Amino acid sequence: MIRVLLADDQALIRGALAALLGLEADIQVVAQVGSGDEVLAAALEHRPDVALLDVQMPGKDGLAAAAELRDALPRCRVLILTTFGRPGYLARAMSAGAAGFVVKDAPPEQLVDAVRRVHSGLRVVDPGLAAESLSSGASPLSGREREVLAAARDGGTVADLARAVHLSEGTVRNHLSAAIGKTGARTRAEAVRIADDRGWL
């Protein structure tokens, strides 16, 4: 029996996934959570074989939760399931220890097959996304540049950003300038949009 943990902030999607997987004789959904902050505690309690994580959730995102699971429960295989099939997400998911990456518009049988395959030790990646990821290359942003751009999503002054990321205002300006240059943007807002669209944030 493959024990599965589901993490998705949309209750309807989570319920549908649980119902779909529950139809399989060899799969049992042992836990469901609605935020990234709940993933590790639920996994430690229920010891799933596979964790099916959405990327964008309240609190920690699915990629951060995947990294936590890799460190705390290395035997739990992570399968990222997301609406946002962005190449940057794929690269970040793999570096966080995910064993697979499937987009939500994949056929149901493909998802079920992906759960079985990652459980058996294989890697599963949506083929279209893999091809796009190879052609677009890796994110040019450093960790700090990504952190500053992510903080800039909600606007705010340089002073606001500096407080949020615990850096000096001059350092924040330098990171913003570098990120704007690396994304080919003209403004901070455009840099955020470009980086978001490519899955770099």
Image (cartoon, helix red, strand yellow):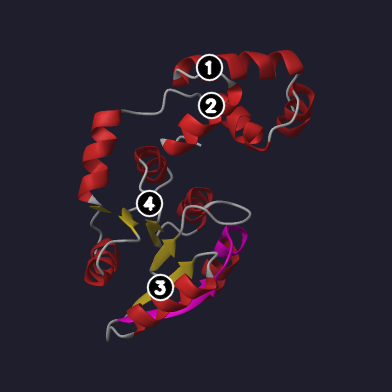
In the figure, is residue 80 to the left or right of 110? right
In the figure, is residue 3 to the left or right of 151? left
Q: Position of residue 22 (x, y in %)?
A: 36, 84
> Would you say the residues marked 1 and 2 are in contact, meaning their CB atoms lie under 8 Å apart?
yes
| Disc 1 target residue | 186
| Marking on residue 4 | 3
Marks 4 and 2, the one that precedes in the sequence: 4
Query: What's the amino acid at mark 1?
Result: Arg
Marks 3 and 2, the one that precedes in the sequence: 3
| Disc 4 target residue | 98
Q: Look at the image and tell me whether residue 25 can be seen.
A: yes
The quarter of the rendered structure image containing the N terminus is bottom left
| Disc 2 target residue | 190
> Would you say the residues marked 3 and 2 are in contact, meaning their CB atoms lie under 8 Å apart?
no
Identified at 50% across, 76% down, the residue is 31
In the figure, is residue 82 to the left or right of 179? left
Disc 3 to disc 1, how far (Cα)? 44 Å
Residue 124 inside the magenta-drawn segment? no
Within 10 angstroms of label 1, few (less than 14), some, or many (20 or more) residues? few
Within 10 angstroms of label 2, few (less than 14), some, or many (20 or more) residues? some
Disc 3 to disc 2, how far (Cα)? 39 Å
Disc 1 to disc 2, how far (Cα)? 7 Å
